[in-house]
Image (cartoon, helix red, strand yellow):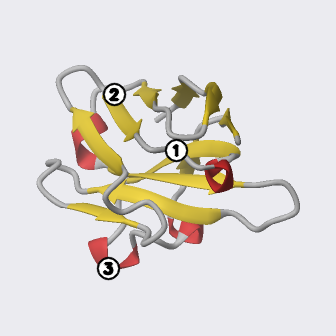
Amino acid sequence: VQLQAFGGGLVQAGGFLRLSCAASGRTFRTYVLGWFRQAPGKEREFVSAISRSGGSTYYADSVKGRFTISRDNAKNIMYLQMNSLKPDDTAVYYCAADRSLILSSYSSGSEYDYWGQGTQVTVSS
């Protein structure tokens, strides 16, 4: 599967953005999907993940209550709605997918085989 993330941009603190991750292929619904981010000088970190059906979602504590992940298997697309953005949310955001991932490993980036190119999110104070 090929992934393309888009929707990033510059926003003021307290604002919102919606990231999208479009995927190719006809087996989109068989992949666990995730969002990760990497800020300058920091390691990549888990943000959110969603199960194949979309029925289960997972969030990092730092974004819980502010971000919402969703997917549309009919359109081969995943979303990350980001509200109440903070300067600490500034990072390059990557979408990822894996077909064989077990849900208990959703937060481990090394478990995902496919990655999008990343989209920059900058939150100004």
Query: Is residue 80 rendered to the left or right of residue 58?
Result: right
Q: Secondary structure at mark 1?
A: loop
Query: Is residue 56 rendered to the left or right of residue 81?
Result: left
**What amino acid type is highlighted by mark number 1?**
Leu
User: Which residue appears farthest toward the bottom when viewing the image?
Assistant: 104
Q: Secondary structure at mark 2?
A: strand
Q: Report the Cα–Cα distance between label 2 and label 1.
A: 22 Å
The location of residue 91, given as percent across then percent down, is 70, 47
| The C terminus: image quadrant | top right
Query: Is residue 77 rendered to the left or right of residue 20?
Result: left
Q: Mark 3 = which residue?
A: 104
Q: Residues within 10 Å of mark 2 (few under 14, many from 20)?
A: some
Q: Name the mark on residue 77.
A: 2
Q: Secondary structure at mark 3?
A: helix
Give the residue at x 36% y 57%: 49
Earlier-in-chain disc, 2 versus 3:
2
In the image, is residue 117 above or below residue 87? Answer: above
**What amino acid type is highlighted by mark number 3?**
Ser
Give the residue at x 31% y 58%: 65
User: Which residue appears farthest toward the right when viewing the image?
Assistant: 41
Q: Name the mark on residue 85.
A: 1
Labels 1, 3: front one:
1
**What amino acid type is highlighted by mark number 2?**
Ile
Q: Residues within 10 Å of mark 3 (few under 14, many from 20)?
A: few
Q: For this rendering, which residue is in front, 64 or 28?
A: 64
Q: Name the mark on residue 48.
A: none
Q: Report the Cα–Cα distance between label 2 and label 3.
A: 23 Å
Give the residue at x 36% y 66%: 101
The location of residue 78, given as percent across then percent down, is 34, 34
Earlier-in-chain disc, 1 versus 3:
1
